[in-house]
Image (tube, grey):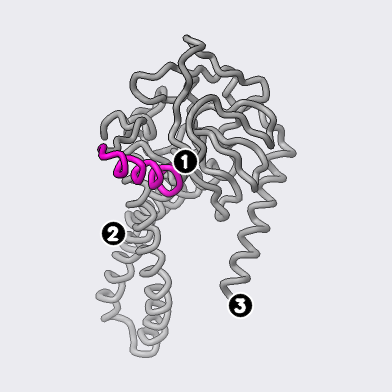
């Protein structure tokens, strides 16, 4: 193997390791559990907590979990519990994407996109370096290249669209739920009222980005180091709600193994459906 080949192998291995690591963190990490003892800590009892949602403002109470929900928390019918700053439930990780594992999910997508395009570059480069191979081996390699290209191209496009979508959400400090379900309704109401809709959680592009990709001791590191804030960002001018005991508790070994096996099982089912 030549020196460029060794370098490419090392670089691609490093990207793959970080991609798999963040994928594992997104699967195994608790997305953000709302503790059953959570109670809104309101500085002034007469001021209601307003949140853009389907049924209006005021304090939010989950009928299924039988406890209050902080702003931006939603009940997941798959996980059967409320998730802090829930973005969506992802079948590919068999877990919700929420406050505590959103960074891991985003970084996983970043590395996956980098790995796909790096693979395409190596694939194109390999086509130009086959001049020293005999005709029979060249034909067999070309079949492999064509199959790999047919797999990589749509995967790269799909992951790039997903990455672009989440970059847009991060810069706006929105979640998928807020964009699709709540933001559309708020925008329509603002247009009917003759006003301009402004997302109440938007703190500016830099602050929005920093709130996701930075954490204590790992500022601007793409390698995920899970972090948990003790409060939920509220609209400007509104009272602050403290999320006491929002840190996920110690996860035992059995729960992690069970979640991992369930994820593998769901992925195998999806792959079988695609293959059939």
Q: Is residue 131 above or below residue 29?
A: below
Q: Is residue 150 above or below residue 117?
A: below
Report which residue position mark 1 lands on.
Answer: 104
Residue 191 falls inside the magenta stretch? yes
Residue 45, x across and y down, in percent = 51, 11
Residue 126 in the figure: left or right of residue 90: left
Residue range (magenta)? 178-195
Residue 77: mark: none
* Distance of label 3 from label 1 (alpha carbons): 31 Å
Residue 121, x across and y down, in percent = 29, 65
Nearer to me, 272 or 70: 70
Task: Tell me whether circle 2 and circle 1 mark residues in contact (CB < 8 Å).
Answer: no
Provide the major secondary structure of the magenta segment: helix
Viewer-nearest of discs 3 and 2: 3
Label 2 Cα neighbours within 10 Å, binned few <14 / some 14-19 / many ≥20: few
Give the residue furthest to the top.
44
Q: Could you tell which of marks 3 and 1 lies nearer the N-terminus? A: 1
Q: Could you tell which of marks 2 and 1 lies nearer the N-terminus? A: 2
Viewer-nearest of discs 2 and 1: 1
Secondary structure state at the residue bearing disc 1: helix
Q: For the point 69% across and 37% down, which residue is it? A: 64
Report which residue position mark 2 lands on.
Answer: 4
* Distance of label 3 from label 2 (alpha carbons): 39 Å
Nearer to me, 91 or 239: 239
Residue 231, x across and y down, in percent = 48, 21
Is residue 77 something one can see in this rendering?
Answer: yes
Is residue 18 something one can see in this rendering?
Answer: no
Report which residue position mark 3 lands on.
Answer: 276
Secondary structure state at the residue bearing disc 3: loop
Q: For the point 69% across and 30% down, which residue is it? A: 66
Give the residue furthest to the bottom.
136
């Amino acid at each position: 193997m030549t020196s460029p080949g060794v370098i490419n192998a090392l670089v691609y291995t490093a990207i793959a390791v970080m991609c798999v690591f963040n994928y594992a963190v997104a699967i195994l990490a608790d997305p953000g559990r709302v503790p059953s003892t959570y109670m809104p800590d309101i500085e002034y009892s007469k001021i209601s907590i307003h949140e853009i949602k389907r049924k209006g403002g005021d304090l939010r109470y989950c009928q299924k979990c039988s406890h209050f929900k902080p702003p931006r928390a939603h009940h997941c019918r798959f996980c059967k519990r409320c998730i802090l700053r829930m973005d969506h439930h992802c079948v590919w990780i068999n877990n919700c994407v929420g406050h505590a594992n959103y960074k891991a999910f985003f970084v996983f997508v970043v590395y996956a996109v980098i790995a796909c395009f790096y693979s395409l570059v190596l694939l194109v480069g390999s086509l130009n370096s086959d001049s020293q191979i005999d005709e029979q081996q060249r034909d067999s390699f070309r079949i492999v290249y064509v199959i790999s290209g047919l797999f990589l191209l749509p995967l790269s496009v799909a992951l790039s669209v997903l990455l672009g979508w989440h970059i847009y959400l991060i810069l706006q400090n929105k979640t998928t739920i807020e964009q699709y379900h709540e933001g559309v309704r708020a925008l329509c109401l603002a247009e009917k009222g003759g006003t301009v809709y402004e997302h109440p959680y938007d703190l500016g592009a830099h602050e929005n980005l920093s709130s996701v990709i930075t954490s204590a001791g790992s500022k601007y590191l793409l390698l995920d180091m899970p972090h948990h804030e003790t409060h939920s960002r509220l609209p400007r001018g509104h009272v602050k709600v403290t999320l006491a005991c929002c840190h996920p508790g110690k996860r035992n070994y059995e729960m992690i193994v069970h979640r991992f096996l369930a994820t593998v099982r769901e992925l195998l089912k999806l792959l079988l459906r695609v293959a059939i």
